[in-house]
Amino acid sequence: MENQLAKSTEERTFQYQDSLPSLPVPSLKESLKKYLESVKPFANEEEYRKTEEIVQKFQSGIGEKLHQKLLERAKGKRNWLEEWWLNVAYLDVRIPSQLNVNFAGPAAHFEHYWPPKEGTQLERGSIILWHSLNYWQLLRKEKVPVHKVGNTPLDMNQFRMLFSTCKVPGITRDSIMNYFRTESEGRSPNHIVVLCRGRAFVFDVIHEGCLVTPPELLRQLTYIHKKCHSEPDGPGIAALTSEERTRWAKAREYLIGLDAENLALLEKIQSSLLVYSMEDDSPHVTPEDYSEIIAAILIGDPTVRWGDKSYNLISFSNGVFGCNCDHAPFDAMVMVNISYYVDEKIFQNEGRWKGSEKVRDIPLPEELIFTVDEKVLNDISQAKAQYLREASDLQIAAYAFTSFGKKLTKNKMLHPDTFIQLALQLAYYRLHGRPGCCYETAMTRYFYHGRTETMRSCTVEAVRWCQSMQDPSVSLHERQQKMLQAFAKHNKMMKDCSAGKGFDRHLLGLLLIAKEEGLPVPELFTDPLFSKSGGGGNFVLSTSLVGYLRVQGVVVPMVHNGYGFFYHIRDDRLSSSNE
């Protein structure tokens, strides 16, 4: 009876999903007021006056009509933005997504028990894989704790998308296939795919009802590694996933038309729990400098990662690891969560497996052998060339700043995230002599299926502070006052965004209503200041706080001449990755 009671009172991962509030539609007046404030740093008086007129006209005219239609739409949906956001931000995008959209990051194990060491790739790989599979089992049993702020539960839906999820290319729009089920919902796939030297293998991770152990996983990985290192390389079908989306969709259709068995093989990869990649490289990494490892994970060998997969776990020859994930189905906090879980387990067990060495008689991995012809091989080499050409345009620097961390900023009553955002504004201002339009991720997980909102960090207050820092005639006291004003503004805006009172997604909703109704694009969106201030995905600075843990991650910049700035904040250090 006690056990039953314990079970019934235990919180389940997805139990609050049905009771979360719907995503609200902000007030039109408030959104336009906030928008006007956000363009100020990028306009002279005349430009600002012109934009002000456009906004007033929009508010009393077409904007109000579109807003009413948006309110109507919101009545029938718990999240009016969800489907639109998925399509506009991810599925309709035609540029290659593996490089431009995916996020990636190194595993932090190299900081403690697993420093880079040749000859450890397979053994460590079996342990990291086992801990990841344990997390999968926790999710299936709904034992991953519900994220909360105070006592308020946050949306956990994105955690359904971590395993057995894959994007599938379409001619004009991609789709997401999700095969994951909790135990109470039914069967879920239990195989993983391993990519090595252009070849693909598959094996089940459940044997006779039990999860395979690290020694058993080691046997499977060793078999694949030996086979691939003693035989010719495979065609590298995976490289096609790094191609421009419509081109990949056509190549995929051709591949299926060539042999129906190819479709079954593709579906095996799509439904797999995750893709495990074996790389031959040994990227340099230290706790102070992980530029090389991040480059290897973000822009490494396209033949050994499936760019459309929600979870590619990547292993390198020197026993360091990372992941590369499709961004469409979830945001990075999901990956941060599992990465932290795995890192803690490895740390607690001193990087070793302390269980039984017994290996059961498990079927060997099976190779997925695609039928290919000259055209497919040509498509693959074109995809590789395109990928390497684009990747060469990216510069990556990832260092740790060890003078201080969040302990000191909190001690001074300054919010650590705002501290970094303002430092970033000042750095850009000093480097370029002008303000930099900046996107920071705000989360909206208080709401049903909430994901993110744009937080525009380049405020009027931030610019005034930057100007004061560059002006030797301004006193220290005045600089401090301006800094505190910039802090207060940033903190209020972040709070508003998380409470569903941001304005960027609202404006996007109004634009999409106009498009759906076949109306001309309102002048608000064609006004040069709209894109100059970052609108329409034109932020020169694309930034995000990865968290307050050991986990780090990156995404490429939004625009060609821009910066990607991703950072995590610890007690005694601040680590950032910039591209």
Image: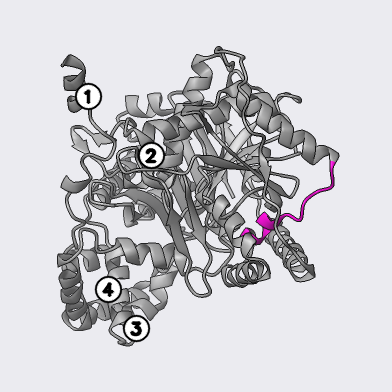
Across and down, in percent, residue 549 comes to: 44, 29
List the residue tagged with mark 2: 417
Q: Name the side, left or right, on which 159 lies relative to 389.
A: left
**Magenta span covers which residues?**
231-241
- The answer to which of marks 3 and 4 sits earlier in the sequence is 4
- The answer to which of marks 4 and 2 sits earlier in the sequence is 2
The amino acid sitting under disc 4 is Leu
List the residue tagged with mark 1: 7
Instruction: Please determine whether, in this image, residue 195 is positioned above or below residue 359.
Output: below
The amino acid sitting under disc 1 is Lys
- The answer to which of marks 1 and 2 sits earlier in the sequence is 1
Q: Name the side, left or right, on which 176 lies relative to 519.
A: right
Q: CA distance from mark 4 to mark 2?
A: 30 Å
Across and down, in percent, residue 555 comes to: 53, 50
The residue drawn where x is 18% and y is 64% is 30
Secondary structure at numbered mark 2: helix
Q: CA distance from mark 1 to mark 3?
A: 54 Å
Q: CA distance from mark 2 to mark 3?
A: 36 Å
Across and down, in percent, residue 50 comes to: 32, 80
The amino acid sitting under disc 3 is Val
- In the foreground, 521 or 402: 521
List the residue tagged with mark 4: 510
Secondary structure at numbered mark 4: helix
List the residue tagged with mark 3: 521
